[in-house]
Image (cartoon, coloured by chain):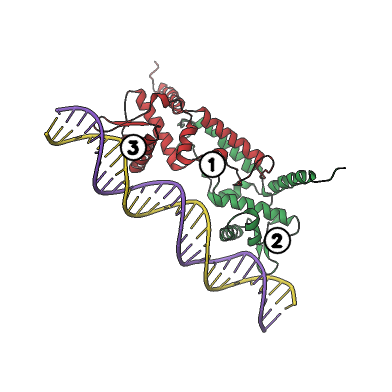
Chain colours: A red, B green, C purple, D yellow
Amino acid sequence: MFKKETEYALRGMVYIQLQNLKERRPGVAEIAREIEAPYFFTAKIFQRLAKQGFVKSMKGKGGGFFIDPEKKDLPLKELIIAIEGEELFIGCGFGLKNCDENNPCPMHHQYGMIRDQINQLVAGETIQSLARNTLSKTLAFSRENVDER
Amino acid sequence: MFKKETEYALRGMVYIQLQNLKERRPGVAEIAREIEAPYFFTAKIFQRLAKQGFVKSMKGKGGGFFIDPEKKDLPLKELIIAIEGEELFIGCGFGLKNCDENNPCPMHHQYGMIRDQINQLVAGETIQSLARNTLSKTLAFSRENVDER
DNA sequence: ATATTAAAAGACCTTTTTATCTTTTATTAT
DNA sequence: ATAATAAAAGATAAAAAGGTCTTTTAATAT
């Protein structure tokens, strides 16, 4: 569905957000290790995202990445479009350039529903909301490790 | 969503089926022209699909491609998997290798619904059913051209 | 028979995606 | 000040996707 670059970016952004909530600023080495992505590729991706303002960074000792609090509720869609373009969100399943209601491809209706659902997902979720999902899942999971006697 | 190769294959297969219904066997040149795909790339794609049995072909004068009547109700999924693999139908939206109910990615639930819908579409439709869609649309469209006085 | 037609085979090329590495610049703890 | 740390920049390279071309094989109409 998404490109590798997008997957790494999403995983990394959620990881950064989770660490930021603990008052930490992870560096590339930590991010790459935790999200299981190649170090240099991860570096390049976040360098680009920093330049585009999706993430902030600090150089030097104690430096690392953090998410601008003003941007933490930005829909995933904006981030994904910045990385891989909007083809997935507007394109035709058959690859036709002029597929619409008046000139529909053979899957027009069925594919339209899927595309709508994809749009709904990425427009509705944010890095913040995904981090919260993880947090509540982790909490639920760690509860199983609680000694309940 | 799909790879270019898959898009061309789907468009071409539906075109072949539509022509077969008119007792015609289109050649590569005609198919490529009609589906607006590069000639040699189209040739390669259908050569491969012929080898895999998704389509039959005849060489020489009057030759061309046609769909084995026994295969015309084969789900699109089989065709698509043969071309680009099954990643789209089983993979995690975050790109995690071990994403499941017990170890879900932050989008697990939401993405699962989309993946299910994709699977439903490609498992339910066939080249035959898509050709029928086109036919009924074309009919509806050409009706507008009918002089109704 | 043979000329013509059309697919099969496979070598080759280009672009995009994915990944790696080196050098430079900025920051901070000491 | 300076040593250590970490991101920025940018060159390079490997792999996959997308596309092109030439030669060979098979079929058929004449």
Q: Is residue B126 above or below residue B59?
A: above
> Which amino acid type is shown beneath numbered disc 3?
Arg
> Does residue B111 appear to the left or right of A135 in the view shown?
right
Q: Is residue B83 above or below residue C11?
A: above
Q: Nearer the viewer, residue B73 or A103?
A: A103
> Does residue B113 appear to the left or right of A126 in the view shown?
right
Asked if badge 2 and badge 1 are on a common chain, one would say: no
Q: Which residue is mark 3?
A: A33
For the residues carrying marks 3 and 2, which lies nearer the camera in this image?
2
Q: Which residue is mark 1?
A: A87
Give coordinates of residue D4: x percent, y percent: 18, 35
Q: Nearer the viewer, residue B70 or C1?
A: C1
For the residues carrying marks 3 and 1, which lies nearer the camera in this image?
1
Q: CA distance from mark 3 to mark 2?
A: 55 Å
Whether pointer 2 and pointer 1 mark residues with C-beta atoms closer than 8 Å, the reply is no
Q: Nearer the viewer, residue A91 or A11?
A: A91
Asked if badge 3 and badge 1 are on a common chain, one would say: yes
For the residues carrying marks 2 and 1, which lies nearer the camera in this image?
1
Secondary element under disc 3, as helix, strand or loop, is helix
State the residue at coordinates (39%, 32%): A53
Q: CA distance from mark 2 to mark 1?
A: 34 Å
Give coordinates of residue A95: x percent, y percent: 59, 47
> Which amino acid type is shown beneath numbered disc 1?
Glu
Q: CA distance from mark 3 to mark 1?
A: 30 Å
In this view of the protein, can residue B97 be seen by the observer? Answer: no
**Subunit ID for the residue under disc 3:** A
The outermost residue toward the top is: A149
- In primary-sequence order, the first of circles 3 and 1 is 3
Give coordinates of residue B144: x percent, y percent: 78, 43
> Which amino acid type is shown beneath numbered disc 2?
Arg
Q: Which residue is mark 2?
A: B25
Whether pointer 3 and pointer 1 mark residues with C-beta atoms closer than 8 Å, the reply is no
